[in-house]
């Protein structure tokens, strides 16, 4: 079967499930369309293995237009302190669970002090068109509680956006060494897709700094033996992994088309 990696924000067609929006990013390999964001939808089980799992569809949206549609509160600095992690959760919301059933919460170092910071995913008790909406909250630990850094809506997929697979939210993690937060998604049907989006605060603003996207056909490949592309937006580079006829990995490195880093409020899932 012909293997094909769909570059930059994979669109996996789902005949029986509606679309879910992939996050927009700041750049793409030079050989691809550079407009953003990309809309993605999970592929239906009715599709045969010989069908191409995705087609890349793009539409141009300026950051200002995207931010206008988003209700993200980025880098909030109201000065209010929250005494506990639970007090960060808005009324009508609860801390979500990851794919293992554990609370979707990460603890670690996200700034220069030695106090423990927190990132968590919360979900609304009121379901929308694609299930329960999610939101990521990041707060810095202080001597008197937690200082809110950002409430980012639309950076985590809703509970029914994973296609036949179901809930696409997989995990949340903090890298204390790099001061980064990563959100992982996974979904699809016979054709599975996954992604990981990494954010870091730079000069009091949170940005999308890295992304990994991949897909594979479950009848032939696994998540560890597939084709994927990773983006380093700060460095302006990408690495593409494909498989030859003998399933040997072939790596290709390239330079992105450039542009500013994407602010967290311009990253859109549904």
Image (tube, grey):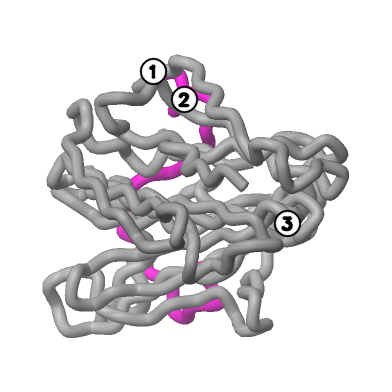
Horizontal side of 174 relative to 134 (left or right) equals: left
Q: Give the class, few, some or many, for how many residues have Cα within 10 Å of label 2's Cα (few <14, many ≥20).
A: some
Q: Nearer the viewer, mark 3 or mark 2?
A: 3
| Residue holding disc 1 | 62
Is residue 67 shown in magenta? Answer: yes
The quadrant in which residue 64 appears is top left
| Residue holding disc 2 | 66
Dot 3: what SS? loop
Horizontal side of 50 relative to 250 (left or right) equals: right
Is residue 251 shown in magenta? Answer: no
Horizontal side of 109 relative to 224 (left or right) equals: left
| Residue holding disc 3 | 159
Q: Could you tell which of marks 3 and 2 lies nearer the N-terminus?
A: 2
Q: Is residue 7 above or below residue 223?
A: above
Q: Nearer the viewer, residue 101 or 123?
A: 101
As measured in the structure, the alpha-carbon distance from the residue carrying label 3 to the one carrying label 1 is: 27 Å
């Amino acid at each position: 079967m012909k293997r094909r990696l769909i570059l930059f924000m994979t669109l996996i067609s789902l005949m029986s499930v509606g679309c879910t929006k992939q996050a927009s990013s700041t750049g793409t390999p030079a050989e691809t369309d550079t407009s953003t964001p990309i809309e993605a939808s999970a592929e239906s089980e009715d599709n045969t293995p010989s069908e191409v799992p995705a087609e890349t569809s793009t539409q141009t949206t300026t950051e200002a237009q995207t931010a206008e549609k988003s209700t993200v509160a980025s880098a909030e600095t109201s000065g209010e302190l929250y005494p506990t992690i639970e007090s960060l959760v808005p009324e009508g919301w609860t801390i979500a669970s990851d794919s293992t059933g554990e609370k979707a919460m990460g603890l670690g170092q996200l700034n220069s002090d030695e106090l423990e910071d927190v990132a968590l995913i919360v979900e609304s008790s009121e379901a929308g068109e694609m299930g329960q909406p999610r939101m990521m909250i990041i707060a810095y630990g202080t001597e008197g509680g937690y200082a809110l850094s950002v409430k980012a809506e639309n950076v985590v997929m809703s509970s029914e956006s994973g296609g036949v697979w179901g809930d696409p939210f997989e995990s949340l993690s903090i890298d204390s060494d790099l001061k980064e937060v990563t959100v992982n998604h996974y979904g699809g049907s016979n054709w599975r897709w996954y992604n990981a989006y990494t954010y870091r605060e730079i000069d009091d603003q949170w940005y999308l700094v890295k992304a990994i996207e991949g897909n594979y056909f479950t009848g032939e490949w696994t998540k560890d033996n597939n084709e994927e592309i990773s983006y380093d937006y700060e460095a302006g580079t990408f690495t593409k992994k494909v498989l030859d006829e003998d399933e040997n990995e072939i790596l290709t490195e390239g330079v992105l088309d450039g542009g500013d880093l994407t602010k967290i409020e311009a990253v859109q899932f549904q």
